[in-house]
Image: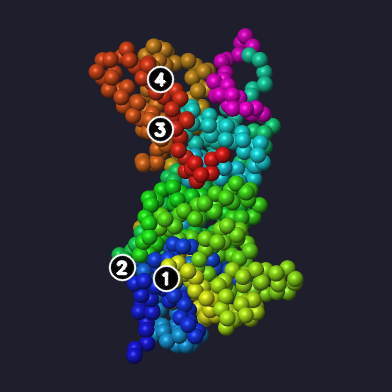
Amino acid sequence: MATPDNKTADTDEKIFIGKSEQTAWLTLALANRHGLVTGATGTGKTVSLQVMAEGFARAGVPVFAADIKGDLSGISEVGEAKDFILKRAGEMGLNFQPDQFSTVFWDVFGEQGHPVRATVTEMGPLLLSRMLDLNDVQEGVLNVAFRVADENGLPLLDMKDLRSLLDAIVPNGRKKGPDDEEDPFAEIRKVAQSYGNVSKATVGTIQRQLLVLENQGGTKFFGEPALLLKDFMKTDSDGRGMVNILVADKLMQNPRLYATFLLWMLSELFEELPEAGDLPKPKLVFFFDEAHLLFNDAPKALLDKIEQVVRLIRSKGVGVYFVTQNPIDVPDKVLAQLGNRVQHALRAFTPRDQKAVNAAAQTFRPNPKLDTARVIMELGKGEALVSFLEGGGTPTMVERVMIRPPTARIGPITPEERKAIMGKSPVKGKYDTAVDAESAYEMLQKRVATTAAPAEGQDGGAGGGILGQIGSIVGTIFGTNVRRGRLTTGQVIARDVTRSVTNKVVGGIVADLGKSVGGSLGGSVGRALVRGALGGLLRR
């Protein structure tokens, strides 16, 4: 019988992960039931992640993974037939054949990959509050700001949009004198105060936290062109899944920003993808490295929603794999959703460590042949305890296996190799240049200018009258660089009403104009807003 090579080791239904007395297979049809890769630093978690990513890509499943140390970038280059790799492959009956996988690099800072951006509106007030580490009062004021933006048709795309809006809702704290100009933001402030007290001190605190976020790279993250997640879900010319790697070494300098960013991506996938049911293989597999950062100090309401998204997103055909040091880093409600497990070695030098080892052992289905807690401390580098789902979705008994060697390069690539890969990237040029579209900042500046120098011809001039209002609406919806297909429900209503109104003007029915605009837009745009970043699930 011939020795199996890389391709024949896997099947159309399973991925070969490792082997000892038993072969460890990850079933593709159950891969969207999520998974967990754990182990102490230096025990082989990254290699296991790479082996799984290669298997998914080989099966035509796109992969997204955060690369904390840069080691995962080697998946883009041909592997090397080193002695220890050939030895391990031979012990498993594999005919090792070096391979490489089509890779796209992403970087929030745009330095080692294509820029990743989101608009402030897509991030939403809850996730943005966590990113800024705001308390409940400050989060409430931020929610007020988003509501005011909705009701006044002010798109929040980048940081300066949010800053200018916060300035606009702050009470001016003085009475108007006889020589004072009319306050351009009086109506905005009135709306803001109707939702609760908005104090200057609270807004000042939020502004200072925004400054901290800007210094950490937030200015580069918020803006347009915003990321289209469908660009993660592609295959190459050979039908293999594209491997998307987020360069996260610099992003990890702000762990809260890193965790909130990946949670935003997960929530966007949940919102955008249609229901898919049980598929022969996932549409996308999402690896969340340093997963404990997602749950550290997270409020209960957020933890509940994370558990809900993890539980429901599998029906969209997405598999989520958390990578962390110990299973106890993950809350029990989330841990219960992770059916595919790979456990590398843990060390027990203190009573607390011993407790963690015992807790990790209890997460597996027992094997009478193994003392799981003892074996976890004895595992060598490249060895792991594994349990994957099988049949009707039940986990197999835990087995001790040697993880198969990756076929692509192990370790980081050079800057020259990275540059060459980006030069032939399928999204080259799509996100590399930032676009500063007209949004809340520019629109609020126009209000100030209009107040200082009122436009001529209030009944029909360019800046006044009902036609001026229509022009503003058209500019907001059609004249900005908001991505097509990403309009909020309120903006869709505004667009449709504007088209209707324009048709009436063309037909000469000017009498109905004021009623159409005033009646339809006044209360619908803000209240009908449907936002990204967990949408209604995370809205309080």
* Earlier sequence position, callout 2 versus callout 4: 2
Residue 85 appearing in the image: no
Rendered residue at 49%/39% (across/down): 121
Magenta stretch: helix, strand or loop mostly: loop
Q: Is residue 378 left or right of residue 501?
A: right
* Earlier sequence position, callout 3 versus callout 4: 3
Rendered residue at 66%/15% (across/down): 175
Q: CA distance from mark 2 to mark 4?
A: 55 Å
The answer to whether residue 534 is above or below residue 520 is below
* Earlier sequence position, callout 3 versus callout 2: 2
Q: Dot 4 corresponds to which residue?
A: 519
Rendered residue at 37%/16% (across/down): 515
Asked if the stretch drawn in magenta spans residue 179, the answer is yes
* Earlier sequence position, callout 1 versus callout 4: 1
Q: Dot 3 corresponds to which residue?
A: 491
Amino acid on which the number 3 mark rests in the picture: Gln
Q: Which residues are magenta?
A: 177-199
Camera-nearest label, 1 or 3: 1
Q: Residue furthest top?
A: 178
Rendered residue at 40%/15% (across/down): 465
Disc 2 and disc 4 in contact, CB within 8 angstroms:
no
